[in-house]
């Protein structure tokens, strides 16, 4: 009795979850913590585990997550050089697709998933080298993440992505043998992250992590300093850069969606002056990344360590391959700030970034951290959940000796042996199951009745006993049930006999099907009544839970001591909808002004409100009375008018959350003016014109 009520309680909550997430689109998520992490050291003894020294996290054996493959240890010459997680591995010589099913996860929660691969000549065959790399594909659920190309037997390779769990309760990581060597894996990690982080990532779009760097640091930072266990690696051997750091606390903007650990933000690089270099430059080549597509996203993280004097500025222009990607940016003082792309960068073979002071009197540029990603669009859809659950229950009940791992139908080329699927409508569904000659024992599983789209079911040549379950009557599409050479009782249950009589269903025993007993049963009404009552109850509870969620999420109820001031100040930036990218072609709001209009707007350049690296900043008024800030580039430039147009477009390519909206621009001869939305109260602070002009901004108005 205890047990029973416990399980119905569970189903009840599960139902609520489904209802809330699917119907109401609400996610009442507890904050992530390490108990929701999954840390697997592949290839250690079944059932064993240990606590990792660096992170304090417990790594467990992989046997609970996969039932394929064989354990190995890397070659003895490598053993002492690598951390424990990398010294053992599991290899998959006999399966085309081998999947780890990581659970529990919560559908629609955001996760970081990371796999490590160290070949270490585990098989003594020296299979990994540059000329003949050992290659296999890595999938997340049913979509390919990357081709893992192992070119050096003593290198650690990594596959990492930020994802949203799309399958109910699990995430699968699959290794696919593509004929270029035996897939293997050393370690696998799953970390929950707050859903408010990395808002670009959703259930149809993942980010593959290419780089995550802690600049100016001498050591790697991960869990527990980073509660999400992102690994921020230091960069050594950069002669043009000097490391700088601060011990002062660094705050976050309320709408900060990256939460780069303070310890990471407290270090930065700045030009060392070696060779007269005054900018920060770095690059990567597409060919070296091993990624499938030449598309990248970048996040640059900045924080100013010094309280600048009014006549000081650290404003920079940021260039990608010589084209300006962001003009006149100055990092805010002791605040974690980010510049990030929300569209993929233009494809290139090389991505060369230069962060240059935009005035020779400026302080040298700084850069605290960076992340680089590649997009992963989810093209394949997972099989419908009910079918997945049912076929997994069948697999578990009979301990099916087939290589049934990962998704049963998707992608089509790795569909489970013995299944047929329909892909006509999404998600795919199972249309036929052939488990003949599969050494099944016991009774026919009632789970078959959940495969609602099946046309035929072949269970012949198995040692099956008992009766045909009455619940198979639910299978309205079932046309043939093969039960040859089984020990199944030949009585046809009432739920099926009608369709057998109408010749809509054939049940094939060794001989012709026997006559069926008279149809009966009217406990259907009871079922309906129970469902209705249950449904109402669930709905009421859902409403209560929604209310509770909303109440819980109310910001007023979350104490946040010590940051009130900041939050109040920044709440001005908190837009309910995230800002959208704007470019000249897609955003009709960015206007081109004539020079005459510009004179009108600025009242003949009357009111100077500041000076940035870009040039002077003027106060202005549009015809509709809206206040604007006009940034004027007075310096003559070698660029022609056409290129200025491109420059304006580029200014919008790298998006900055705290930047006010670009309203328009004016190209006049060699000069360029940018017209921005003007925000009074100094709320604009550094992003447009720097702290030094804040006071000036306060007393302007349009009449
Ligand atoms: C997911 O993100 C991609 C890229 O940002 C976007 O194009 C797409 O519309 C998003 N999809 C959903 C369902 O939000
Ligand atoms: C900046 O101002 C300080 C005093 O406020 C002065 O000592 C310094 O020389 C000035 N620097 C420049 C470059 O003008
Ligand atoms: C099921 O598979 C067996 C062996 O693979 C085959 O002989 C049989 O014809 C299949 N059943 C159906 C209904 O196709
Ligand atoms: C079939 O299963 C029954 C019990 O489930 C068992 O007693 C019997 O030995 C099995 N027969 C064969 C041929 O495996």
Image (cartoon, rainbow, N blue to C red):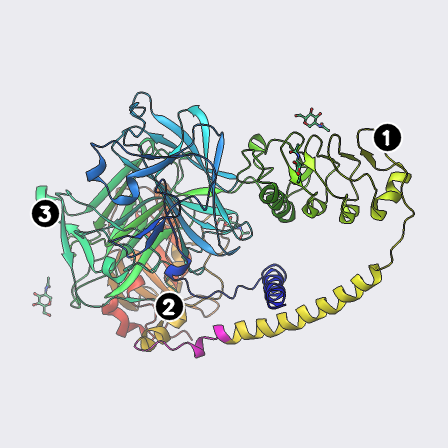
Q: Is residue 457 left or right of residue 599?
A: right
Q: Are marks 1 and 2 in contact (CB under 8 Å)?
A: no
Mark 2 residue crowding within 10 angstroms, few (<14) / some (14–19) / many (20+):
some
Please tell me whether mark 1 or mark 3 is closer to you in this view.
Answer: 1
Q: Which residue is mark 1?
A: 512
Quarter containing the N terminus: bottom right
Q: Which residue is mark 2?
A: 254
- Marked residue nearer the N-terminal end (1 or 2): 2
Number of dots carrying numbers: 3
Mark 2 sits near ligand 1, with its Cβ under 8 Å away: no
- Marked residue nearer the N-terminal end (1 or 3): 3
- Marked residue nearer the N-terminal end (3 or 2): 2
Asked whether 261 or 118 is in front, the reply is 118
SS at badge 3: loop
As measured in the structure, the alpha-carbon distance from the residue carrying label 3 to the one carrying label 2 is 36 Å
Asked whether 176 or 469 is in front, the reply is 469
Give coordinates of residue 212: x percent, y percent: 30, 48
Mark 3 residue crowding within 10 angstroms, few (<14) / some (14–19) / many (20+):
some
């Amino acid at each position: 009795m205890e047990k029973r009520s416990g399980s119905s309680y569970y189903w009840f909550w599960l139902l609520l979850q489904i209802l809330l997430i699917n119907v109401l689109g609400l996610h009442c998520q507890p904050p992530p913590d390490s108990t929701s992490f999954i840390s697997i050291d592949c290839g250690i003894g079944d059932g064993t585990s240990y606590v990792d020294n660096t992170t304090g996290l417990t790594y467990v054996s992989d046997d609970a997550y996969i039932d394929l493959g064989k354990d190995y240890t890397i070659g003895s010459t490598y053993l002492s050089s690598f951390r424990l997680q990398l010294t053992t591995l599991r290899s998959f010589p006999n399966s085309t697709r081998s999947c780890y099913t990581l659970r529990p996860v919560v559908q629609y929660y955001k996760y970081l998933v990371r796999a490590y691969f160290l070949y270490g000549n585990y098989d003594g065959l020296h299979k990994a080298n540059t000329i003949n790399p050992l290659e296999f594909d890595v999938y997340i659920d049913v979509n390919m993440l990357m081709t893992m190309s192992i070119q050096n037997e003593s290198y650690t390779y990594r596959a990492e992505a930020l994802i949203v769990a799309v399958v109910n309760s699990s995430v699968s990581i699959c290794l696919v043998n593509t004929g270029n060597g035996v897939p293997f894996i050393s370690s696998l990690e799953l970390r929950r992250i707050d859903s408010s982080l990395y808002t670009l990532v959703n259930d149809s779009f993942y980010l593959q992590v290419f780089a995550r760097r802690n600049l100016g640091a001498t050591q790697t930072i991960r869990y527990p300093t980073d509660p999400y266990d992102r690994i921020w690696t230091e960069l050594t051997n950069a002669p043009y850069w000097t490391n700088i750091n601060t011990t002062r606390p660094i705050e976050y903007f309320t709408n900060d969606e990256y939460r780069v650990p303070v310890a990471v933000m407290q270090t930065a690089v700045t030009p060392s002056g070696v060779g007269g270099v005054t900018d920060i430059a770095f690059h990567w080549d597409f060919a070296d990344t091993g990624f499938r597509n030449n598309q990248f996203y970048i996040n640059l993280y900045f924080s100013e360590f010094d309280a600048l004097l009014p006549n000081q500025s650290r404003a920079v222009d940021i260039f990608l391959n010589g084209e300006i990607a962001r003009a006149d940016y100055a990092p805010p003082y002791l605040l974690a700030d980010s510049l990030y792309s929300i569209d993929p960068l233009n494809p290139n073979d090389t991505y060369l970034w230069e962060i240059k002071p935009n005035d020779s009197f400026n302080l040298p540029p700084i850069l605290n951290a960076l992340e680089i990603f590649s997009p992963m669009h989810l093209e394949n859809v997972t099989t419908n959940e009910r079918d997945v659950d049912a076929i997994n229950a069948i697999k578990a009940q009979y301990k099916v000796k087939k290589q049934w791992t990962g998704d049963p139908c998707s992608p089509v080329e790795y569909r489970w042996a013995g299944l047929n699927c329909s892909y006509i409508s999404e998600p795919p569904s199972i249309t036929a199951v052939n488990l003949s000659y599969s050494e099944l024992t016991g009774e026919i599983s009632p789970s078959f009745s959940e495969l609602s789209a099946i046309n035929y079911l072949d269970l012949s040549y198995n040692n099956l006993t008992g009766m045909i379950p009455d619940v198979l009557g639910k299978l309205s599409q079932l046309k043939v049930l093969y039960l040859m050479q089984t020990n199944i009782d030949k009585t046809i249950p009432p739920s099926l006999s009608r369709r057998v009589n109408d010749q809509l269903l054939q049940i094939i025993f060794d001989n012709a099907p026997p006559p069926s007993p008279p149809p009966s049963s009217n406990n259907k009404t009871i079922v309906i009544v129970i469902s209705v009552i249950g449904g109402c109850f669930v709905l009421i509870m859902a409403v209560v839970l929604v209310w509770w969620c909303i109440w819980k999420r109310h910001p007023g109820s979350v104490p946040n001591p010590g940051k009130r001031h900041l939050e109040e100040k920044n709440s001005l930036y908190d837009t309910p909808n995230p800002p959208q990218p704007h470019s000249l072609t897609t955003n009709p709001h960015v206007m081109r002004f004539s020079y005459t209009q510009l004179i009108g707007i600025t009242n003949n350049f009357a009111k100077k409100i500041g000076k940035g690296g870009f040039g002077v900043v003027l106060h202005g008024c549009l015809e509709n009375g809206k206040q604007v800030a006009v940034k004027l580039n007075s310096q003559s430039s070698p660029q022609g008018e056409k290129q200025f147009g491109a420059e304006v477009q580029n200014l919008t390519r790298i998006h900055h959350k705290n930047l006010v909206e670009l309203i328009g621009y004016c190209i006049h001869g060699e000069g360029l003016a940018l017209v921005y939305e003007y925000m009074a109260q100094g709320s604009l602070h550094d992003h447009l014109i720097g702290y030094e002009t804040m006071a000036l901004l306060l007393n302007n108005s349009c009449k």
